[in-house]
Every structure is written in C-alpha cells, then in structure tokens.
Amino acid sequence: MAPPRRKSRGGRLFREALDAHPGPTLLVSRAGTVLHVNAAAEELLGLSGSRFGLRPVAALPRTGVALAELVARSVAERVSTQGEIDLGPPKGKVVATAAPLLKRSGVRAVVVRLREAQGRIDLEALAAGLAHEIKNPLAGLKGAAELMGDELAAGSPLRVYTELIAREAKRVDGLVQSLLDLTRPLPLELRPENVHAVIDDVLLLAKGLLPRGVAFERRFDPSLPEVELDRDSVQQVLLNLVKNAAEAMAGRQGAVVIETGIAPGMRVRVRGRTRQLLRIAVIDQGPGLPEGVELFTPFATDKPRGTGLGLVISRRIAEAHGGRLELRDRRDGGGAEAELLLPL
Ligand SMILES: Nc1ncnc2c1ncn2[C@@H]1O[C@H](COP(=O)(O)OP(=O)(O)O)[C@@H](O)[C@H]1O
Ligand SMILES: [Mg+2]
C-alpha cells in the first residue's frame, strides 16, 4: 500500500487517538512501511523524538526483522499473529501482536501492539500454573471420596456426601481442563476430513444431551468436498455448540438443525491461497441470545452451572484454522444460530 498522500481528518484523528493511548502501538502498511509510531511505542523502542514514519518496519533498530516477519505473516494469512521480541536489557522481552485491518479486498494495514512482558502478571501463565496446581490435589480428593464411599454400607445415607464430592471434583476438573485448553498453544493436526462424518460422530455423542421432545435435524450439502481440519478440536467446537443449543431447548419441543454448505460470497486468504469457506450452522429454537451476557468472554454465563468457556475456546479453535465463529439471533424469529466458518 502506498503511504496515504493526503492526511484525511479520520486518519489524523486515528493517529491522535493512537498517541493518546497508553499502550505502545505501531501502524504499519500492508507492504511493511511504518505509517505511525505512537508516543508509548517511541519511548519503549527508544525512538523518542525521532520520527520513524514512512520507513520500512524492518529498519527499526533491534526489533525490526522480527516485527516485519509478524506483519508479513498477518498480511498473508489475514489473522492476528503474536510473537515475543527481545528489546535487550533493561527492557527485556515484549509480546508483539500484529492485527490486520481488513477491508473487502484484503488487508489495509496492520496494527502492531507491544505489551511489556516484565513487571506485569502474565495471566496466561497464571491460569496455566493455577490449573496445574489444582489438578493433583483434586485427584487426591476424588480418590479419597471414592475410598470412603467403598467403606460405606450400600444403603448408607452418608453416600450422598461422597457422591457429591466426586461430582463436584469432576466439575472442577473439567473447569481446570478448560482453563488449560484456553492457555495452551493450539497445535493443529490438519488432515482432509469428511465434514459430515465428523458432525455425525458429534451428534451421536450429543444425543443424550437433548431434552425430551427435541431431535437433531441434518441439513447437509452432499456436494461438499473434504476439508483440511483438526478433527479432535473441530469436534470439540461442534460439541460445545450443540450442547449450548440443547441447553437452550430445555423445556421446549422442536429441532436443533445442523446445516452445512459453502458460505455464499465469502473468501479468505490462508497461507497465500484464496479459499472459500465451509459453513456449519447449529440452529436452535430456544429463547435466543441473553441480554447482559458478554458473549465470547471467559466466565460470562447465564447458566447456574455454566463456565462461559465453551464459546471462548471454540472461537480460538476456529481462528487457529483460519476460520471464524459467530453467534447470533435468528433473523426469522426465535432461537439462536451459531455459525462456524472454516477455509475449504
Ligand atoms: N444457543 C444459544 N442460545 C442462547 N444463548 C446461548 C446459546 N449459546 C450460548 N449462549 C449464551 O452464551 C453463554 C456462554 O456460552 P458458553 O461459552 O458455551 O458457556 P456456558 O455454556 O458454560 O454458559 C451462555 O451462558 C448463554 O448465555
Ligand atoms: Mg456451553
């Protein structure tokens, strides 16, 4: 992209907003030219006073090559990319996130945010550490409750307590596992898969979750080709979506519809190739989306025993595939529709 010839009002306002923002941020063109370095980034990168604009990002001292690589990757793959960048002592390492600003025909520019890794609590590490610390004592608790249960006579009224401990321990274990899933990097094993076979497996598993009077209805597009995906993690996404749909149908009658097809008019660039998107929709006839629940936010749930992690984890998996996950109310009244889009 050529540098903007005339500075529009919006562009100037955008730069001023960046300068006012306390987080170190750079705006880089899709060709790798630095369009703006905000004040915090100038300070962090030791560029104070020197206007670095309109030079290649690769020319930035120390960090340039690594940043240029991140930017190039997020332009080519049209996804946010993250990497650690060493500023050397005394500043140490920072985490850089390059997020593409997309327009219809491609990437317009890339916003690079730098986050100081030192002196702050690394929430991901904290969650992973906490989860790890909880797992072992929890297994001990569960084991002890089981042993205690074995000692009790078959009809003992105390059994409710040992069963309660086992049940709650299992719940916490699931929660901790989800936290771990959320903080772990996602190594995907992509293989060509028959999408409908992948979905059918999930529906078989999930059948027991449906309330009485509710059935699955498959609306499959038989012409779909095989799709490169990580079977286990995509099944995890579908299970989360189908489970949410089943829970939304509690106390109601009707169908949970699973619809497949090629998303009309949509394309993404993944690893240098333009691809169409496979669409898998899970449509329910429940109450629709709740008000006041910040969807796709950890622990945001309106269920007494919910975790609010299902959607977060699922979106992360979709994005790791170069795809997307959305949840919306159905246009034609009643119910919600979850839409998983994966590059074909
Ligand atoms: N199909 C749906 N219909 C209505 N609300 C939904 C649906 N799917 C998700 N939600 C809302 O999103 C919230 C978060 O979902 P999720 O991340 O799966 O966590 P959980 O199911 O544990 O609450 C739910 O608590 C619910 O409020
Ligand atoms: Mg859920």
Image: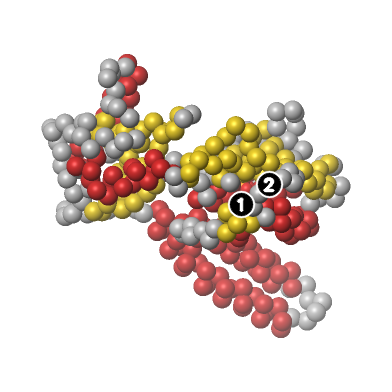
Q: Is residue 290 left or right of residue 106?
A: right
What residue lies at 36% left-to-right and 33% top-to-bottom? 109
**Mark 2 and mark 1: span between their CA atoms?**
8 Å
Residue labelled with disc 1: 227
Whether residue 256 appears in this view of the structure is: no
- Label 2–label 1 contact, CB within 8 A: yes
Q: In this orientation, which residue lies closer to the viewer: 142 or 274? A: 274
Horizontal and vertical percent position of residue 152: 74, 81
Q: Is residue 152 left or right of residue 26?
A: right
- Identity, as a three-letter code, of the amino acid under mark 2: Leu
Residue labelled with disc 2: 224
Q: Secondary structure at mark 1?
A: strand
Q: Which of the 4 image quadrants contains residue 8?
A: top left
Relative vertical location of residue 245 with respect to residue 92 in this rendering, above or below: above
Q: Is residue 81 left or right of residue 63?
A: right
Q: In this orientation, which residue lies closer to the viewer: 106 or 292? A: 106
Q: Which of the 4 image quadrants contains residue 38?
A: top left
Q: In this orientation, which residue lies closer to the viewer: 261 or 61? A: 261
Q: Which mark is residue 245?
A: none
Horizontal and vertical percent position of residue 142: 61, 73
Within 8 Å: ligand 1 and the Cβ of disc 2? Answer: no
- Identity, as a three-letter code, of the amino acid under mark 1: Val
